[in-house]
Amino acid sequence: MYSERNLRKLDNEYHLVDRTYDDTLLKLAYLAATLTNEDAKEYVLQGAGRRLRILKCCIHNVFAMFPLTQERVLTDDEAAQLCIPVHAFLINTAGVADNLAWTFAKEKNAALKNTDVGLHLSKTKDLLTPEFRHYLEEEPISTWSKRYLKEYRDSLAHRIPLYIPPGETPDGKRLPVPVFRGSVKSDHVMMLHPQLLADFNTVAEIVEKFIKFEFPIAAKLDQAIAAM
């Protein structure tokens, strides 16, 4: 499992999830208040905002179903049940970025086909500010989006869903393994709890940068209210 040092670090990060959720939801609310297009407002509040709550609940469910100090090996059914919030988390993590892209397209009245709307699609990126485009294209966001999130999301939706192994047997001793992976043929595995926390923080950061660079009036509103 995790070392004592990592346990403390992960536990501290976990207890910041609700605060990060509240802060990010407020930013989305301030953004919606500055928008003039009703469809754009819906994508912010009923799209990104709703998904954000789902992400928060998925993290809480995973930490409840598989605590950081888990010592018992999961059964096959328990491992399958644990996959459900992780699947929902990844789909909705990708969905938040899509909702932001649709918010931008609707509010800016961009002449884009549905298949061209996406923060990482070239025809949408061409319309973004140079600052936000640079943020999306630099590390670590570029690799996180293209080689991690898109790969797992597309595989989950169209090919092989990720799974969580119930346990392993090193030296004949069975231990719970807090990881998830895609194909059994792949050696690429992700640590469960740290990855979900990192993904949630990345989503919050993307929302913050999106508002800062594309809708600075909303960013200033957020700052002004925070200073009161």
Image (cartoon, rainbow, N blue to C red):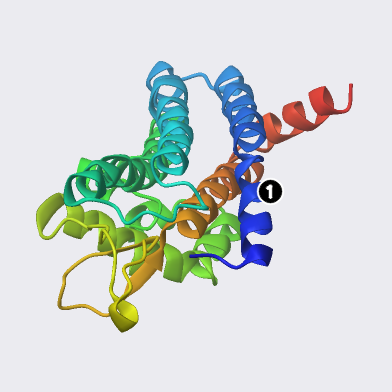
In the rendered image, the vertical position of residue 18 relative to residue 131, given as above or below? above
Viewed as shown, does residue 41 lie left or right of 28? left
Q: Residue at x 60, y 49 (%)?
A: 205
For the view shown, which residue lies furthest in the right direction?
228
In the rendered image, the vertical position of residue 42 relative to residue 19, given as above or below? above
Type of the residue with mark 1? Asn
Viewed as shown, does residue 41 lie left or right of 182? right
Q: Which of 85 and 201 is in front in this view?
A: 85
Q: Dot 1, crowdedness within 10 Å: few (<14), some or many (≥20)?
A: few
Viewed as shown, does residue 49 lie left or right of 39? right
Viewed as shown, does residue 184 lie left or right of 97? left
Q: Which residue is drawn at 56% across and 65% down?
A: 134
Q: Is mark 1 on a helix, strand or loop?
A: helix
Q: Position of residue 15 (x, y in %)?
A: 65, 40
Q: Position of residue 168 (x, y in %)?
A: 28, 70
Q: Which residue is drawn at 88% across and 28% down?
A: 227
